């Protein structure tokens, strides 16, 4: 280990195309998609046969067979089999949190290289049997004779056969993420028209990113798919206004299928390393990962399920001495348009900043032209665990092309938020020289 912290290089990332659930990837597993994303990264950075110190990541919607998803995915790639795979899960912040864990070890000299990866599919969601039937089946497997196996089913009820699909509700509240976001939209008075406008802009920016060739080295073909299938180049703002709300149908609701992220299948990966490791392999540094923060709130008592990133960013700014306005790019995960807008409004609200963030003054407004400049999750889709790696790879490329500093903010289930700051290699070098 080193006595002083080292810089953490983000060398870049790739992902497979993101597809709406139950479409092109309907028959594929998290393992297959994660392996596909890792193989794309191996090809991009010429890592065939290379030992990577750690591959860290996971999925949110998993089967019991996915007992060590990251390691199994590594074994399906051309990476050296000596590469460890570590599986973790922090809801929608999974692959960003994976990158932060890797970064801490690189900075302290414990490792030289790492890959953060995330995959998710709701097309292949686990369907479990009732607890009573599961117990019977376990007992039956322990019996030796056919008669003893039959006796296990004494008192059997057909109701035990009813499958139990994964719950979409927060265990602590019984409300879905969309229902929680509706409460946030009402608390912060986020109009439907503003949500639709943000969704419209996300699709338009994403479509332009593909048309300009910007996405060419960020997305690798997989399973016969070459681009995301959720982007709507011909999106119409007037048509968005005609859609019905989906989470609150009382007349007060504002969230629709169009201004919310769709259920999505996909995977993404990003490569991080020490400066020395990158130089030894001849790999240019796209950006430096300079600071990061995880936070949580008491959403059970009404603090807003998806508002924890406001806290994470506030703490991050305190530690770095930066202001909210000191960024050239803002990558705020679009779980829902209302979530992004509520976050921005909270940072502008003196009362929220005083009560929740402990600030004498509000953090203030940002330049909206710097927000999600290539589109975000509403357009591309949101395979839960993959979104952090997608955003990180995109921001690294933006910083490499344009210079400057970028802020990442990701909300997660369970009332948590993950935030990070990245700087372009050029900007960091100029600052060091000054």
Image (cartoon, rainbow, N blue to C red):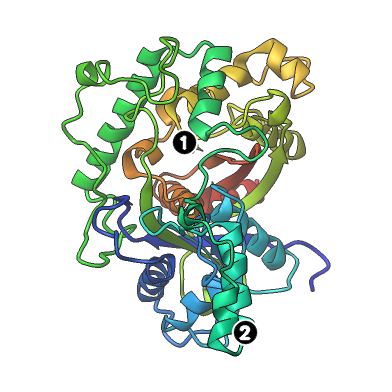
- Left or right of residue 430, residue 40 in this image: left
The Cα atoms of the two marked residues, 1 and 2, are separated by: 48 Å
Q: Is residue 87 visible?
A: no
308 and 20: which one is in front? 20
The residue singled out by tag 2 in the image is: 143
**Quadrant for the N terminus in the image:** bottom right
- Left or right of residue 15, residue 160 in this image: right
Question: Does the residue at mark 1 contact the one at mark 2 (Cβ under 8 Å)?
Answer: no
Residue 83 vs 275, above or below: the answer is: below
Give the percent coordinates (x, y) of residue 364.
61, 18
Give the percent coordinates (x, y) of residue 102.
64, 64
Residue at 57% over, 48% down = 93
Q: Earlier in the sequence, mark 1 or mark 2?
A: 2
Residue 185's disc is none
The residue singled out by tag 1 in the image is: 335
Give the percent coordinates (x, y) of residue 46.
39, 78
Q: Quadrant of residue 36?
A: bottom left
Q: Is residue 222 visible?
A: yes
- Tell me the element at label 1: loop
Give the percent coordinates (x, y) of residue 394.
42, 50
Q: Quadrant of residue 201?
A: top left
354 and 65: which one is in front? 65
């Amino acid at each position: 280990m080193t006595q002083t912290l080292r810089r953490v290089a983000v060398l870049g990332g790739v992902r497979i195309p993101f597809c709406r659930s139950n479409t092109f990837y309907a028959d594929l597993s998290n393992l297959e998609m994660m392996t596909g994303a890792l193989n794309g990264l191996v090809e991009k950075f010429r890592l065939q046969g290379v030992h990577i110190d750690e591959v860290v990541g996971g999925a949110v919607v998993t089967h019991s067979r996915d007992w060590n998803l990251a390691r199994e995915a590594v074994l399906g790639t051309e990476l050296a089999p000596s590469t460890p795979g570590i599986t973790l899960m922090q809801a929608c912040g999974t692959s960003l949190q994976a990158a932060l864990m890797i970064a801490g070890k690189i900075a302290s000299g414990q490792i030289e290289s790492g890959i953060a990866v995330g995959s998710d599919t709701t097309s292949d969601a686990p369907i479990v049997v009732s607890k009573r039937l599961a117990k019977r089946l376990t007992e039956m497997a322990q019996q030796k004779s056919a008669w003893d196996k039959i006796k296990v089913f004494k008192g059997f009820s057909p109701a035990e056969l009813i499958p139990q699909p994964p719950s979409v509700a927060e265990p602590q509240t019984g409300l879905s993420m969309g229902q929680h976001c509706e409460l946030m939209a009402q608390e912060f008075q986020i109009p439907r028209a503003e949500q639709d406008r943000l969704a419209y802009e996300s699709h338009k920016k994403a479509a332009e990113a593909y048309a300009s060739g910007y996405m060419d080295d960020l997305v690798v073909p997989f399973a016969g798919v070459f681009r995301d299938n959720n982007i709507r180049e011909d999106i119409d703002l007037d048509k968005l206004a005609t859609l019905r709300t989906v989470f609150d149908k009382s007349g007060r609701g504002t969230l629709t299928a169009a201004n919310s992220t769709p259920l999505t299948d996909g995977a993404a990966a990003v490569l991080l390393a020490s400066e020395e490791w990158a130089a030894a392999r001849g790999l240019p540094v796209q950006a430096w990962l300079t600071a990061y923060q995880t936070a949580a709130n008491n959403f059970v008592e009404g603090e807003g399920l998806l508002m924890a990133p406001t806290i994470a960013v506030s703490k991050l700014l305190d530690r770095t001495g930066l202001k909210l306005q000191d960024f050239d790019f803002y990558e705020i995960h679009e779980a829902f348009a209302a979530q992004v807008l509520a976050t921005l409004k909270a940072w502008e609200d003196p009362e929220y900043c005083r009560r929740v963030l402990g600030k004498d003054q509000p953090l203030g407004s940002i330049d909206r032209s710097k927000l999600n400049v290539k589109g975000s999750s509403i357009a591309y889709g949101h395979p839960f665990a993959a979104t952090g790696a997608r955003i990180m790879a995109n921001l690294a490329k933006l910083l490499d092309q344009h210079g400057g500093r970028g802020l990442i903010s990701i909300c997660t289930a369970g009332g948590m938020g993950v935030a990070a700051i990245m700087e372009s290699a050029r900007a960091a070098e100029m600052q060091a020289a000054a």
